[in-house]
Image (cartoon, grey):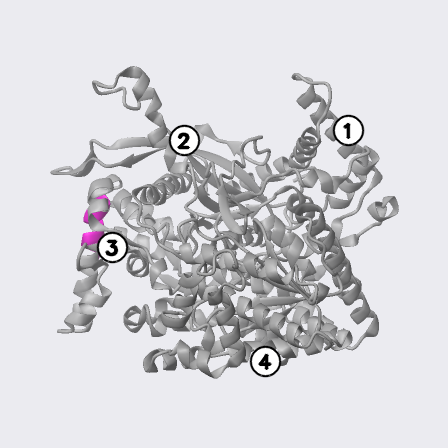
Amino acid sequence: LAVDKKKQISVRGLAGVENVADLKTNFNRHLHFTLVKDRNVATKRDYYFALANTVRDHLVGRWIRTQQHYYEKDPKRVYYLSLEFYMGRTLQNTMVNLALENACDEATYQLGLDMEELQDIEEDAGLGNGGLGRLAACFLDSMASLGLAAYGYGIRYEFGIFNQKIVNGWQVEEADDWLRYGNPWEKARPEYMRPVHFYGRVEHTVDGVQWVDTQVVLALPYDTPVPGYRNNIVNTMRLWSAKAPCDFNLKDFNVGGYIQAVLDRNLAENISRVLYPNDNFFEGKELRLKQEYFVVAATLQDIIRRFKASKFGSTDFVRMDLSMLPDKVAIQLNDTHPALAIPELMRILLDIEKLTWEKSWDIVIRTCAYTNHTVLPEALERWPVDLFQNLLPRHLEIIYEINRRHLERVSKNYPGDADRMRRMSLIEEGGTKKINMAHLCIVGSHAVNGVARIHSEIIKDTVFKDFYEMDPQKFQNKTNGITPRRWLVMCNPGLAEVLAERIGEDYIRDLDQLKKLLDFVNDDALIRDVAKVKQENKIKFAAHLEEHYKVKINPSSMFDVQVKRIHEYKRQLLNCLHIITLYNRIKKEPNKSWTPRTIMIGGKAAPGYHTAKMIIKLITAIGDIVNNDPVVGDRLKVIFLENYRVTLAEKVIPAADLSEQISTAGTEASGTGNMKFMLNGALTIGTMDGANVEMAEEAGEENLFIFGMRVPDVEAMEKKGYDAMEYYNRIPELKQAMDQISGGFFSPDHPALFKDLVTMLMHHDRFKVFADYEAYIKCQDKVGALYKNPKEWTKKVIHNIAGCGKFSSDRTISQYAREIWGMEPSLEKIAAPDDPR
């Protein structure tokens, strides 16, 4: 172990003697100041905080210098507005980006500590649900690495995504108290506190419009540094926390009295208490609307303050002319959650800055851009008008006026087309009038993008067809990407090193260079090294599972992995049917030489999503039968990975052989887990959905296991009607599996346990699981056969890794910068704090 610890790994930075000595000195200094307070015995957590603070010291000089650099150069700034930032842990990522990993490893080793053990003390910053929140985190890394003056703005939730416990096979939620021990990576900035207004009423006077008698909540910012990859740039993620003002409930004659008034401060501060745990589902709760306005109102005040205060040619001059805003500010809306930025910016320009409607609207459109993340109708935000009337009366007026002018334009372009007017309105009439937030975003933005080519085409052809016909120039594609720093160098150093030995280290900044690997695709040494790294990762993950979940698994089996949020459209149920089919085949012919598999499924179900919770119970129930059947032995194991989160992804993805990406064609907007598996040497079994389409294009379709209906097939089936019973009656293995589920084979103590799931699959399955069953099973047979030929398998792996270049978030962000924000990315370093300027 000692020898292994000391091994120099080039991609992890150099452990110079002076560097290591300095780190030890600073570590001891931090430890001393921690302990001098009240204890004399250090705990593991004390050591973690000492290390975190030591590493943080290396950030602050660069952070201050970067912000100073922006103030002097006055570049255009981009503001990424998101209600979710799924950051995971920060310590190791910071060491990677600052090239400190080897030096810290050596320093802690010399102090008699194990760095990996210290890293495990850090809590995940779980301020996101899944893809959308993790995308925002990858984007922050890329924006810093590309030298963009970028800011992530969101909410500092006191409780992030819940921790998932599995009890008797059922999901149980537990609050994620991630701030319990403090967060060494954030800095509160009370000097930039901002008021946010709610409720009240609108007065139209001769001097203009006033929003009066409002309730005020204060937004307190916390800044987290975002380091670029070895370029000395450190950007800022600013998250707002809700605080009641000092006079809260005390200013007017308070009947409840002083004590009750102070207790009621919680009501205001609840705004930043908890992340809503829904992925791809809209829940129209007032608290959620408050969160959405809270982040937008605080952020826009900050953006305008910074715009006005920026050095503009000279120090005695501040910028007052807001018509310049779009030249200096770009605002990207991550889904419709921050859509209120559009009416809020209008309110500021009209009511406070006293600009005309026309001038204000021109500024708003040229500043804002909108990213769409889903076409599922249940995920689209539609807020009841009466909620707005009460909470944000001025914004409702502004939205009505935006809509009036918008419909006037529609009617000019399509005279007499009343149905088109109805379809394109921002206000949906019907039972209760609702505001369609996606329509607001499209009308109020100069660019609208989908997140993979197929998804961008689908939104133009279907959900936003009318808008595309009227404004085709607004619609773009920006295929998602992932940061190769966290998702290769950090989580899979063994593979990163094998690649660097062949093609150099530059691919970490420029992932397209991975295509140089095509020269080595038949190189026996590379094939051996890639396979060896995978095997080491599998052994390490198997040990992790044994330690934490007391499950023993066979590391030479195929690791078949599906990790993502539990949702009907992601079709974990299709995976379940394959598991049951495999089990039945082994039972039928126990002496055949089956390819051994360990099938791992992980992910959280939204607490209110009954079907998703039943899917988890089914997976664990299948595991209970399969894993305890002596006939099967270690040829098939089923594991539900509890509490899937960023930190678990970093462990399981490098160990996976097979990546399951099996959503119904046309439902997964992009997917990003698919890219992480591809970059880490797994092969993909998947449908032609989301970014899978482009992955097959980049790596060669023959190097993925593509199966099932394409989008046109799904559309054709919608037209003719999907008849699940036809498949059930025609395919004996499918019938057997379904009969086992419904007959209680997997729930002997409660035979009818899964009747709801069975009824759904047989009679109202929107995602057509049975329609792809046969193709999926056949494709899985091909997977099993190829796995028996390790050399051919690994060649396909190398083709996949070589095709990953496109899926770097650096490429994605470069395209946003040039094609939406009007900014130019750069790979230049700025001077380090210890360099002369």
The answer to whether 414 appears left or right of 595 in the picture is left
Q: Position of residue 510 (x, y in %)?
A: 65, 62
Which residue is nearer to you in this view: 602 or 404?
602
Report how far apart the C-alphas of labels 2 and 1 lie in the structure.
36 Å
Report the residue marked by disc 3.
Answer: 435
User: In the rendered image, which quarter contains the C terminus?
Assistant: top right
Label 3 or label 2, whichever lies nearer to me, is 3
Amino acid found under the numbered disc labelled 3: Ile
Q: Residue at x 52, y 53 (%)?
A: 134
Q: Main secondary structure of the magenta part?
A: helix
Mark 3 Cα shell of 10 Å, populated few (<14), some (14-19), many (≥20): many
The answer to whether 634 appears left or right of 738 in the picture is right
Amino acid found under the numbered disc labelled 1: Thr
Report how far apart the C-alphas of labels 3 and 1 lie in the structure.
59 Å
Report the residue marked by disc 2.
Answer: 193
The answer to the question of whether label 3 and label 1 lie on touching residues, with beta carbons closer than 8 A, is no
Element at badge 1? helix
Element at badge 2? loop
Q: Is residue 707 visible?
A: no
The answer to the question of whether label 1 and label 4 lie on touching residues, with beta carbons closer than 8 A, is no
Report the residue marked by disc 4.
Answer: 778
Labels 2 and 4: the sequence-earlier one? 2
Instruction: Read off the magenta span.
Output: 394-402
